Image (cartoon, rainbow, N blue to C red):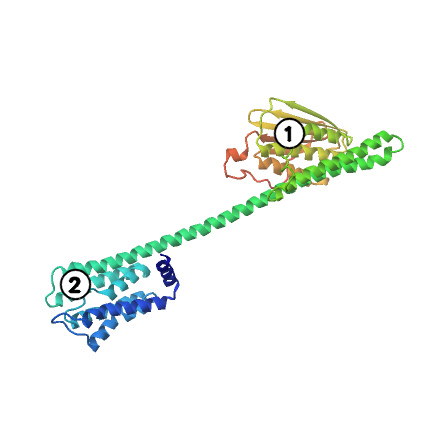
């Protein structure tokens, strides 16, 4: 059963000249067959007749390279052979193949010109033929029109297939672009998370390490607490780093229990407790009725508070900080205020504040940072309680995260 399909597949992939030469030989044999076995009163095949028959078949070898010239040459030999032989061939084999090729490969003007020329030539030839029957006119004309229509269908099918292939390639490129964009966004998110984790943990460890030698003799218990805080910060950083880097694996290793979820607002008391062990007193308050948040907003809120407290420990020289969560139906408001030295224009904008702005913008929110009205430094962030993906499915970010945060001068 597979042999005919295999032969057809090999025929399609063969060299065009080989296929067209075989087609020309078949047409020549079909044209000559009527004169090899003539009916009573018919002409036998002569040298001149064979030459005229060859003129309707041999040009088909170049039908794909020069379809219009091939059809024009056959149009000259076909009526000459029809008028030379008695009776003429019943079917115009060469003309049908030539018209099919012109309809499939030539330009619109050449296609129309050749169709009109062949129909006119066939009608004129039959008019001058002796004893032409009336039924022969529609037979010959419809055979030529049918061959032309098949060529037109083949051209349309080829154009449709090419359009589908082009669309498939375009969709593949778009899919690859979207995949690359998703990978880039995921890497950026991982980089932000790693920055927050490392900056927070290292800041706490540095503060405690600097305080340890000072109190190791005068207050051994406080020194022990400082070293415990260093160990706790290191362990917490290792756990969170392992959690973040887990997304880079294709699957969890056997026996590791799967990936641990990202931290959420429920972990804020643990975060403030860890910061307090570094010597910064943190007051956590909440107003309004808490409501479930989308996962991306939940993680962003935690990371923003973590980064803001890290900045308090690293740069502000503060002794006290407040973290306020304000819930409403449409948004969650985060405010982190310290009693430190505040912001100086000479310090420039750090990566941490830019990261806060980026995280807020990624969720469809806003972030502002600057000196507070009563001194110190304040970070104020508004995050929507609905995910940006839920509001705009597949739409990506609504606003750019580029640029530094705005300085906040009013409450």
Query: Residue 317: percent from the left, percent from the top?
Result: 77, 33
**Residue 115: x, y in percent?**
24, 61
Find the residue positioned furthest to the bottom.
Answer: 47
Q: Quadrant of the C terminus?
A: top right
Does 120 appear above or below 195? Answer: below
Task: Tell me if I can see residue 211 in this picture.
Answer: yes
User: Which residue was labeled with disc 2?
Assistant: 123
Left or right, residue 221 beside residue 45 = right
Circle 1 crowding by C-alpha within 10 Å: few under 14, some 14–19, many from 20: some
Helix, strand or loop at disc 1? Answer: helix
Left or right: where does residue 222 sit relative to residue 64?
right
Which residue sits at x=20%, y=77%? 48
Among the two numbered marks 1 and 2 on one chain, the one whose residue lies closer to the N terminus:
2
Which residue is label 1 attached to? 265
Q: CA distance from mark 1 to mark 2?
A: 89 Å
- Residue 314 appears in the rendering: no
Sort mark 2 into few (<14), some (14-19) or many (20+) by Cα contacts within 10 Å.
some
- Residue furthest to the top: 288
Task: Name the side, left or right, on which 401 lies relative to 313.
Answer: left
3 sits left or right of 44 in the view: right
Residue 408 placement: quadrant: top right
| Number of dots carrying numbers | 2
Farthest residue in the left direction?
Answer: 131
């Amino acid at each position: 059963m597979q042999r005919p399909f295999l032969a057809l597949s090999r025929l399609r992939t063969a060299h065009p000249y080989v296929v067209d030469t075989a087609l020309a030989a078949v047409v020549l044999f079909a044209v000559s067959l009527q004169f090899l076995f003539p009916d009573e009163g018919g002409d036998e095949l002569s040298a001149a007749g064979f030459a005229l028959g060859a003129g309707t078949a041999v040009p088909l070898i170049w039908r794909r390279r020069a379809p219009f010239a091939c059809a024009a040459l056959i149009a000259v030999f076909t009526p000459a052979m029809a008028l030379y032989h008695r009776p003429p061939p019943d079917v115009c084999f060469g003309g049908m193949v030539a018209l099919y090729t012109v309809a499939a490969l030539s330009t619109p003007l050449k296609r129309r010109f050749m169709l009109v020329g062949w129909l006119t030539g066939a009608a004129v030839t039959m008019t001058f033929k002796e004893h032409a029957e009336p039924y022969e006119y529609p037979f010959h004309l419809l055979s030529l029109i049918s061959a032309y229509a098949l060529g037109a269908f083949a051209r349309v099918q080829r154009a449709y297939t090419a359009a589908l292939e082009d669309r498939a390639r375009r969709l593949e490129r778009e899919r690859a672009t979207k995949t690359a964009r998703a990978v880039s966004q995921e890497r950026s998110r991982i980089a932000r998370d790693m920055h927050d984790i490392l900056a927070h943990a290292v800041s706490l460890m540095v503060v405690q390490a600097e305080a340890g030698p000072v109190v190791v003799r005068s207050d051994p218990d406080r020194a022990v607490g400082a070293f415990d805080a260093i160990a706790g910060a290191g362990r917490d950083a290792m756990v969170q780093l392992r959690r973040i880097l887990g997304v880079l694996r294709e699957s969890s290793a056997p026996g590791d229990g799967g990936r641990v979820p990202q931290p959420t607002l429920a972990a804020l008391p643990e975060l403030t407790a860890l910061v307090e062990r570094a010597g910064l007193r943190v007051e956590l308050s909440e107003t309004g009725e808490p409501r479930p948040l989308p996962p991306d907003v939940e993680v962003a809120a935690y990371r923003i508070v973590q980064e803001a407290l890290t900045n308090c420990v690293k740069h502000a020289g503060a002794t006290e900080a407040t973290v306020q969560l304000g819930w409403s139906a449409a948004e969650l408001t985060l405010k982190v205020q310290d009693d430190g030295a505040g912001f100086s224009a000479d310090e420039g904008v750090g990566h941490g504040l830019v990261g806060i702005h980026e995280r807020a913008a990624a969720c469809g929110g806003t972030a502002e940072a600057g000196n507070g009205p009563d001194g110190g430094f304040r970070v104020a962030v508004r995050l929507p309680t609905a995910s940006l993906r839920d509001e705009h499915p597949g739409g990506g970010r609504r606003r750019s995260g580029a640029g530094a945060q705005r300085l906040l001068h009013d409450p």
